């Protein structure tokens, strides 16, 4: 892969928050999708803020110590409270809930225009060995055999919609194993979707499992998770205007180290939808078959009155 492209450099810049005070950070915001801040951006920035307050070299729990003493993120739980304004910065305030021997907990509130728009709780764990098992990785086509997200766009999409889709995902090489929902409108199918992704360039100087890789996966995790809800009903989503949607809450568990600049399989499904909400659940796998992340999200999924 090439060095970071302009879009990837821009994304990395978004994640490089300004420290205003010891536990207060400020991030820029933008959106190429809809006139609000992309939820994955807010979640990733909040996790950056939380991670920057976690001290290095915390003592570990009982038993033999290992050199990997710096805690790494192992879970996050978040609520999207209000739409973010892409024209204004976001202020992230971090509460240091607990610094433990093995686990460290942080709470982050994102504020715009004096109001909270997002709430995150994140937990970090110092390295330790334990029982190991995982389920088997599902079958999926090789990413190199699949078209890029830009190449897979239907030709009949309005030019402005197509341009926004390409721009929004330019920092990430995203490849659908099957046609995305906006390409199969009116043809319901199994509520399951597979997407391969990696950043559009290498991330030199960053070890697998570092905060940056975790935050980039957090950013991408909000892009496609509710696609499976749309697929079950033959809906195309915001791209064609037949569904109004927004993320409500988001949870992730980071099981094993991974690199966001190497291919990751995002295997997603929707077990249910109803009451104006849809649920998506997913697993993220490394290409060599290691289960890296589990993701669950609920979102608003409404049919417009004229739809």
Image (tube, helix red, strand yellow):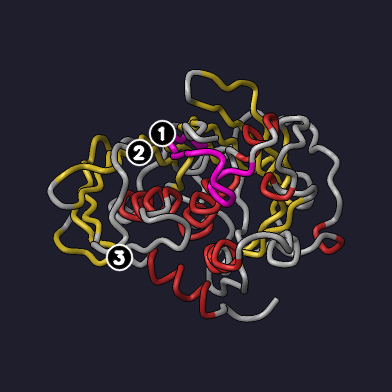
**What residue sits 37% from the left and 39% below the top?**
122
**What residue sits 65% from the left and 22% below the top?**
271
Answer left or right for 67 relative to 261: left
Residue 251 image point, x, y percent:
47, 34
Numbered range of the magenta stretch: 236-252
Residue 180 image point, x, y percent:
71, 48
Q: Nearer the viewer, mark 1 or mark 3?
A: 1
Residue pointed to by mark 2? 80
- The residue tagged with tag 2: helix, strand or loop? strand
Q: Nearer the viewer, residue 100 or 165?
A: 165
Indicate which disc, 1 or 2, sits on the residue closer to the N terminus.
2
Residue pointed to by mark 3? 28
Residue pointed to by mark 1? 248
Q: Are marks 1 and 2 in contact (CB under 8 Å)?
A: yes
Dividing the image into 4 quarters, which one contains the N terminus? bottom right
Answer left or right for 302 relative to 52: right
Q: Please tell me how crowded label 2 is: few (under 14), some (14-19), or many (20+) other residues with Cα within 10 Å.
A: many
């Amino acid at each position: 892969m090439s060095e970071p492209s302009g879009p990837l450099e821009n994304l990395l810049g978004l994640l490089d928050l300004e420290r205003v005070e010891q536990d207060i950070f400020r991030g820029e915001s933008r959106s190429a999708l809809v006139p609000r801040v992309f939820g994955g951006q807010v979640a990733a920035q909040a996790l950056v803020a939380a991670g920057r307050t976690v001290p290095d070299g915390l003592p570990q729990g009982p038993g033999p110590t290992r050199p990997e003493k710096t805690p790494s993120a192992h879970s996050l739980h978040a609520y999207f409270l209000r739409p973010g304004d892409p024209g204004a910065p976001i202020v992230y305030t971090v509460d240091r809930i607990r610094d433990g021997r093995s686990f460290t907990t942080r709470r982050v509130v994102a504020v715009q225009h004096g109001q909270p728009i997002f709430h995150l709780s994140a937990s970090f764990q110092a390295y330790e060995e334990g029982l190991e098992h995982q389920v088997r990785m599902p079958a999926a086509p090789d990413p190199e055999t699949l078209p890029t997200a830009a190449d897979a766009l239907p030709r009949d999409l309005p030019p402005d919609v197509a341009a926004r889709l390409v721009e929004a995902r330019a920092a990430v090489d995203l490849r659908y194993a099957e046609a995305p929902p906006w390409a199969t409108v009116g043809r319901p199918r199994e509520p399951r979707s597979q997407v391969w992704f990696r950043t559009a360039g290498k991330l030199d100087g960053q070890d697998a499992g570092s905060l940056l890789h975790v935050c980039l996966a957090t950013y991408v995790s909000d892009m496609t998770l509710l696609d499976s809800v749309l697929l079950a009903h033959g809906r195309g989503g915001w791209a064609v205007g037949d569904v109004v949607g927004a993320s409500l809450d988001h949870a992730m568990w980071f099981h094993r180290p991974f690199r966001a600049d190497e291919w990751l399989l995002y295997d997603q499904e929707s077990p249910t939808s109803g009451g104006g909400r849809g649920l998506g659940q997913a697993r993220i796998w490394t290409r060599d078959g290691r289960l890296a992340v589990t993701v669950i999200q609920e979102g608003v999924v409404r049919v417009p009155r004229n739809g």
